[in-house]
Image (tube, helix red, strand yellow):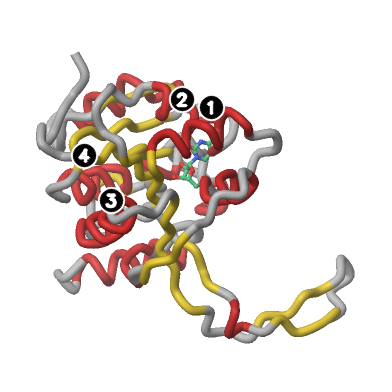
């Protein structure tokens, strides 16, 4: 039996959480690092489960932590936990293979974006529901961006007006995500990149500052402040 949330929901969320998190410094796998006393993964899953459209959640956990992650999430939401792979892409593919029949919209959400609000899930899902095959949440780039050489010399300035910083959850019509992963050759850092390679248009919706990716110790401190401010 596959774990289910809202039986009338049309969305499955895949949560790749199989990374080691070396950039956060030594310690547990990143998804299990504490934020406000609870692992990042717990925050992420709780927010996904709070979105009314979500019917099922599949987490790809570090293989060595499978039982621990199942136990951890048992009291948070009904989720399916599968072993992740060597890369993020392999972890997403493993989770995708475990999605039960039913949901025709699949979202992929990094556990590292632990504070992404349920409202963002709904806006991405709504854009797919309205006819888009692939949808990503984005924010404008505020810094000036330079292209640099391997020896740190500036090669040029990129026009930031055309740039966007990309977040998760990214949303897809299920068959499009399945086709993109089936056709994948090289590992990419996001799923929309695989869909782009199929020539399928990817649409943007406004992202959320709260969906920041917790990668370095500074990000964790920032997330602690956001959480303490009670509106995250
Ligand atoms: O390493 P990076 O920060 O890009 O990882 C993004 C997300 O992918 C994280 O939530 C991480 O846990 C996940 N990941 C995974 N399996 C891997 C590597 C990363 O699920 N082998």
Q: Is residue 64 above or below residue 201?
A: above
The mark closer to the camera, 2 or 4, is: 4
User: Is the C-beta separation of discs 3 and 4 under 8 Å?
Assistant: yes
- Considering only order in the chain, which callout, 2 or 3, is on the residue closer to the N terminus? 2
| Picture coordinates of residue 172, whole percent (x, y) | 40, 45
Q: Nearer the viewer, mark 1 or mark 4?
A: 4
Q: Is residue 97 above or below residue 6?
A: above
Measured in 3D between alpha carbons, the distance from the residue under mark 1 to the one under mark 4, in whole angstroms, is 26 Å
Under circle 3, the secondary element is helix
Q: Position of residue 180 (x, y in %)?
A: 55, 37
Tell me the residue at 55%/30% (across/down): 90
Residue placed under numbered mark 4 in the picture: 10
The reply to whether the C-beta atoms of the residues labelled 2 and 1 are less than 8 Å apart is: yes
Q: Which residue is mark 3?
A: 129
Q: Seen in the image, is 195 located left or right of residue 101?
A: right
Residue furthest top in the image? 1
> What residue is disc 2 on?
94
């Amino acid at each position: 039996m596959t774990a289910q949330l809202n039986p009338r929901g049309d969305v499955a969320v895949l949560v790749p959480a199989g990374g080691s998190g070396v950039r956060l410094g030594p310690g547990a796998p990143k998804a299990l690092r504490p934020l406000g006393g609870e692992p990042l993964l717990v925050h992420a899953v709780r927010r996904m489960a709070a979105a009314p459209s979500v019917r099922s959640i599949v987490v790809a956990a570090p293989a060595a932590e499978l039982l621990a992650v199942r136990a951890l999430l048992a009291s948070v939401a009904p989720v399916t936990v599968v072993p992740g792979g060597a890369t993020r892409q392999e972890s997403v593919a493993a989770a995708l293979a475990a999605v039960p029949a039913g949901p025709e919209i699949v979202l992929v959400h990094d556990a590292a974006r632990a504070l992404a609000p349920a409202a963002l899930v709904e806006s991405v899902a709504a854009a797919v529901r309205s006819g888009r095959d692939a949808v990503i949440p984005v924010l404008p780039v505020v810094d000036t961006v330079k292209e640099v050489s391997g020896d740190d010399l500036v090669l040029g300035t990129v026009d930031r007006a055309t740039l966007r910083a990309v977040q998760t959850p990214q949303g897809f019509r299920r068959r499009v995500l399945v086709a993109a992963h089936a056709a994948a050759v090289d590992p990419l850092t996001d799923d929309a990149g695989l869909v782009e390679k199929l020539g399928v248009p990817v649409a943007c919706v406004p992202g959320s500052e709260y969906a920041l990716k917790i990668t370095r110790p500074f990000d964790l401190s920032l997330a602690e402040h956001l959480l303490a401010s009670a509106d995250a």
